[in-house]
Amino acid sequence: MTHSTHSKPAASETGDPFLLTPGPLTTSRTVKAAMVHDWGSRDASFIAINKAVLTRLCEIANGGGDYVTVPMQGSGTFAVEAMLTSFVPPTGKVLVLINGAYGRRAKRILEIAGRETVVHETAEDTPPDLNEVEAILKATPSITHIFTIHCETTSGILNPIVQIGALAAKYRKGYLIDSMSAFGALPLDARALHVDALAASSNKCIEGVPGLGFVVCRRAALGACKGNATTLVLDLHDQWANFEKTGQYRFTPPIHVIVAFHQALEEFTAEGGVAGRGGRYQSNCRILLEGMTALGFKPLLAPHLQAPIIVTFHMMNHPRFIFQDFYDGLKDRGFIIYPGKLTVADSFRIGCIGRLGEKEMRGALAAVREVLQEMGVTDSATRAA
Ligand SMILES: *Cc1c(COP(=O)(O)O)cnc(C)c1O
């Protein structure tokens, strides 16, 4: 392809392409700048920063005094695995609600840990069937926990965590949530939902850099987890007990990541917390959906199922639409999108999260229009799949 139709590529505050992906994301210059120092991991100034981070995360989940944040070094999956293998005892049985890759991953974690599972799986564009979930709970009283994904990033679908929580409460089951791609952008009231634990990470909607997962835990439920863990490093109870005793991590923490996360949380608060952050993403999502639809693309999800996090679009059914060229053309113009991961449809994804606003979303749409023209997809509006 020739790239003569566009001028200078769009770029972030630090001159990088914008990441329209589900994370890691485009972060602010100030978040990255927070990392150009060294701290001792046992030094009081780092311990104070870490404590402020954990307290703030608990507040965002409306945890009050009943909840505590236990951090876990590593990517988000480390936190999910720590949550599942610490909260579910060897005799436990988890009802796993699956409608995408992250639900399937949780099932795999439980299987490796030797925990029994019961699965309710729906298609990637379909939320769990709550009547069916209730029927399973009635039929299988040995279920001890329900696990669900808040926003299943595979498609961008919003799962009904409040209604699932009501079933967990009615049948007195533990309730575990992977809120990775939603935490900080979509409201989640841990106390009202009576969740046992929810997992998320530094590099999604709080807009930090990758390297720290965390689990917001109900103190009473966490207190009962001693001895459950299947590994030393992912033992949340032990990690927590050590914090209570010393304020410190058991093993080397990703210090720079945590200090950047602290800065990201300050910026999150300055933006107005969940309402402000979620509002910006909502606006990004609306601009993206309107613009892409006008260009002939069709979103996978019905509007009421679409979380304002990431949007899945069907591949365009046009003889001149070649995804690799589309991807490369957008990258040349400063926008990185994300391939699809779906089994139900040939698709790609564009994220709404990270340090992006109206200007960047409109820039991305202009780039999409240019690339379509360059590929010779000029009648796209009539060619949508
Ligand atoms: C990003 C994400 C994770 C964690 O992925 P990592 O690559 O381990 O950070 C888990 N669940 C969901 C729903 C996610 O979006």
Image (cartoon, helix red, strand yellow):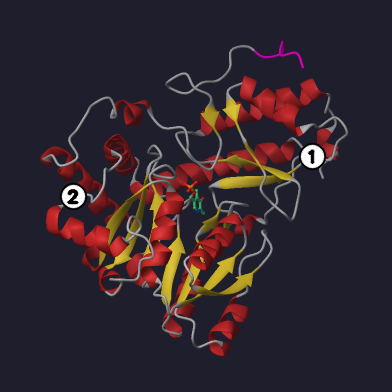
Task: Point out which mark residue 248 bears.
Answer: 2
Mark 2 element type? loop
In this rendered view, identify the residue nearer to me: 258 or 59.
258
Task: Point out which mark residue 316 bears.
Answer: 1
Residue 275 in sight from this viewpoint: yes
**C-alpha gap between disc 1 and disc 2:** 52 Å
Q: Please determine whether, in this image, residue 52 is positioned above or below residue 30.
A: below
In this rendered view, identify the residue nearer to me: 67 or 238.
238
In this rendered view, identify the residue nearer to me: 204 or 185.
204
Is 54 positioned to the left or the right of 86 in the image?
left
Locate residue 267: give its quadrant: top left
Is tag 1's residue or tag 2's residue first in the polypeptide sequence? 2
Number of residues whose C-alpha sits closer than 10 Å to that of mark 2, classed few (under 14), some (14–19) or many (20 or more)? many
Quadrant into which the C terminus falls: top right
Quadrant into which the N terminus falls: top right
Q: Residue furthest left?
A: 44
Q: Residue furthest right?
A: 319
Q: What amino acid does circle 2 point to? A: Gln
Is 347 positioned to the left or the right of 358 in the image?
right
**Position in image of residue 154 (x %, y %):** 61, 52
Q: Nearer the viewer, mark 1 or mark 2?
A: 2
Task: Point out which mark residue 370 bears.
Answer: none
Mark 1 element type? loop
Start and end of the magenta stretch? Answer: 1-6
Residue at (41, 65) in percent of width and height: 85
Q: Please determine whether, in this image, residue 37 is positioned above or below residue 245.
A: above
Q: Is residue 132 magenta?
A: no
